[in-house]
Image (cartoon, helix red, strand yellow):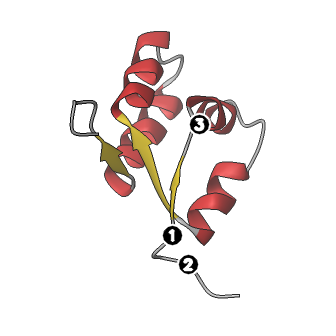
Amino acid sequence: MGRMATSQLVVDTDIIVDYLRRRTEVLREACMRFSCVMTAITLYELKAVGIRSERQERLISMLTEVMDLLPFDLAT
């Protein structure tokens, strides 16, 4: 089955946190199958919780580079 680049998947904060804590590979698998995006609220939540390690900080930075960010405004 090929990559479904036209299908977007909005990734919830919990999925990213579980990935950062090495609890699951769901995020990696989803990003291989879909064009994953995160919301501005998710990014805020990730940063508000407090990054616990340099590894997590690098991963969040990497995710923001490869995932589109859905803004938080009246248009959305």
Mark 3 to mark 1 CA distance (whole Å) = 19 Å
Q: Is residue 69 left or right of residue 50?
A: left
If you read the primary sequence from the N terminus, does the residue marked by circle 3 or circle 1 appear first? Answer: 1
- Residue placed farthest to the bottom in the image? 1
Residue 44 sits above or below residue 2 on the image: above
Q: Are marks 2 and 1 in contact (CB under 8 Å)?
A: yes
- 51 and 27: which is toward the camera: 27
Where, by quadrant of the figure, is residue 22 drawn?
A: top right
**Residue occupying the point 29% across, 39% down:** 76
Mark 3 falls on what kind of element?
helix
Mark 1 falls on what kind of element?
loop
**Crowd band around label 3 with a 10 angstrom C-alpha radius: few (<14), some (14–19), many (20+):** many
In the image, what residue type sits under mark 1? Ser
Q: Which residue is mark 1?
A: 7
Q: Which residue is mark 3?
A: 16
Q: Which residue is mark 2?
A: 4
- In the rendered view of the protein, which quadrant contains the N terminus? bottom right
Q: Are marks 2 and 3 in contact (CB under 8 Å)?
A: no
**Residue occupying the point 39% across, 29% down:** 43
Residue 65 sits above or below residue 76 on the image: below
**Residue occupying the point 45% across, 29% down:** 42
